[in-house]
Amino acid sequence: MLDNLIMGFGAALTPANLLWCFVGVLAGTVIGLLPGLGSTTGVAVLLPLTLSFEPLTALIMLAGIYYGAQYGGTITSVLISTPGEAASVVTAIDGYQMARKGRAGAALSIAAIGSFAAAIVSLVLLVAMAPPFAELALGFGPPENLAVMVLGLATIVSFSSAGGRLRGLAMAVLGILLATVGVDAATGLPRYTFGDVDLLSGLPFVQVMIGLFAVGEVLFQIRQGAAAPIRARFKDLMITKAELSRSTGAIARGSVIGYLLGCLPGAGSTLASFLAYGVEKRVSRNRHEFGQGAIEGVAAPESANNAAANANFVPTLALGIPGGATTAVLLGAFMMYGIQPGPLLFEEQPELVWGLLASFFLGNVMLLVLNLPLAPMFAQLLRIPYGYMYPLILVTSFVGAYSIDNNMFSVWVVFVFGLVGYFMKKFDLPMAPLVLGLVVGALFEKALVQTSAMGGGDLTIILTRPIALVVFLLAALLLAGPSLLKLIPRRQKETV
């Protein structure tokens, strides 16, 4: 295994591959900054430019765009509460609050550090455990996927305090209901589309997020009265040793969670970032700060995001099954170059596989060197008066939304959900459960329908699947654990 990795670094460290790896991560960062584009669109648009490249060089550049876009989406999430990537949505919860307190530089720095650390962890796990994890992922059927979705939904409880748990669950149910718009997974018939063909594919996720977070925040701030620009001292923008110490455990946990979910086809970086945030809110000593600017709330999802992006290549390379939307486009790039991903790829073209895996480490080093010194400079954008910032945010949001599908439907979605986001902020309704419900809803329904079909309408088939049972048990503990713990002192008092 070590010999293969050395061979991979030898292939990735050629001048041409280093150059195009840098071009990829730089282009990815810029693409991530633009709301509505994202890594999938970026890779698809720039794929034709690589036709004249060597296969390894082309794949290194395209992969660099993939994980570079993850960090680019973080920058706008933190600075202006506008997620450039779907997986960066949860980062906006605490990252933007840190920015409002003059700690934007620290938030962006920990995002870069967490992404780099996650890249190292996921690369080690990728090298050591790719074959067994590929076999495990191959054994995941609809019941196991259903269990993972239920576990994701169970984290909803983690986003709300005990007093606001009912509101959190209500928002989650609303998110799941919104996810049912489109085509019925069981019958294939239109559902809740009201005759509009634009709704046949469901509510567009990125446009909904832009409306909820960016436009909703701007409308709320305008109503509250324009806040004074943040004029933090330069040293206040730098990350402190205490913040690094607080983030260490969050980065480690987020990296492992991201890797595990990233190995599962279809789970994706978005669910990984939400699950990591929920787990961190459970275990953190500073859980009362979550939603108010907790640095762990940035470190955990960013680490999970990056680890999942790397782990998405486990099913892609080892099984020929895309781990997510972006790796599906990359799978097309493999085919374009006459390369067939699958179990034999590691044996037939080891230099290409291990060269690509080694480039993940090199690309993340470049991202760290490129973005860590620039984090305080990015944060200086907050010194611009909000009277100028608000129109810029609105224009960027609507233009970015229009550019996704080149139609006005996307613009109207952003506008409508901007109003929804405003009223949610006004009445202090939690957004995270709604977003998670919207993310998981369609996947949950698909897995539920497929599981029911496997059992001939009998869902007890789940009882015959050990992996699914274990995951369901974890979800049950996550939901019932806090309530059970509260009962213990009461019983002790009653016995006294």
Image: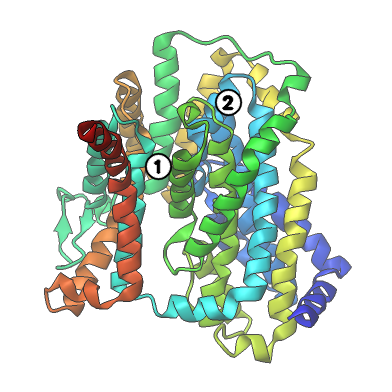
Residue 475 vertical position relative to residue 484 in the rendered view, above or below: below
| Residue 219 figure quarter | top left
Q: How many marks?
A: 2
Percent position (x, y) of residue 117?
69, 52
Circle nearer the viewer, 2 or 1: 2
Q: As displayed, is residue 226 above or below residue 398?
A: above
Dot 2 corresponds to which residue? 98
- In the displayed orientation, state which residue is furthest to the right: 15
- SS at badge 2: helix
Task: Please indicate, yes or no, whether residue 409 appears anywhere in the rendered image.
Answer: no
What residue sits right under mark 1 in the picture? 207
Q: Would residue 427 appear left or right of 334 to someone viewing this image? A: left
Q: Give the alpha-carbon distance from disc 2 to disc 1, as whole Å.
A: 24 Å
Q: Using the image as rendered, state which of residue 115 and residue 22 is in the foreground.
A: 115
Label whose residue precedes the other's in the sequence (2 or 1): 2
Q: Residues within 10 Å of mark 2 (few under 14, many from 20)?
A: many
The x and y percentages for residue 243 are 67, 32
Task: Inspect the image, locate mark 2, and give the three-letter code of the amino acid beneath it.
Answer: Met
Residue 410 % position (x, y): 37, 42
Tag 1: amino acid? Gln
Which one is in front, 371 or 483? 483
Which circle marks residue 314 in the picture?
none
Write the residue at 57% across / 82% down. 341
* Residue at the image point whose x is 51% and y is 56% from the top: 257
Q: Residue at x 16, y 59 (%)?
A: 190
Q: Does the rendering let one see residue 472?
A: yes
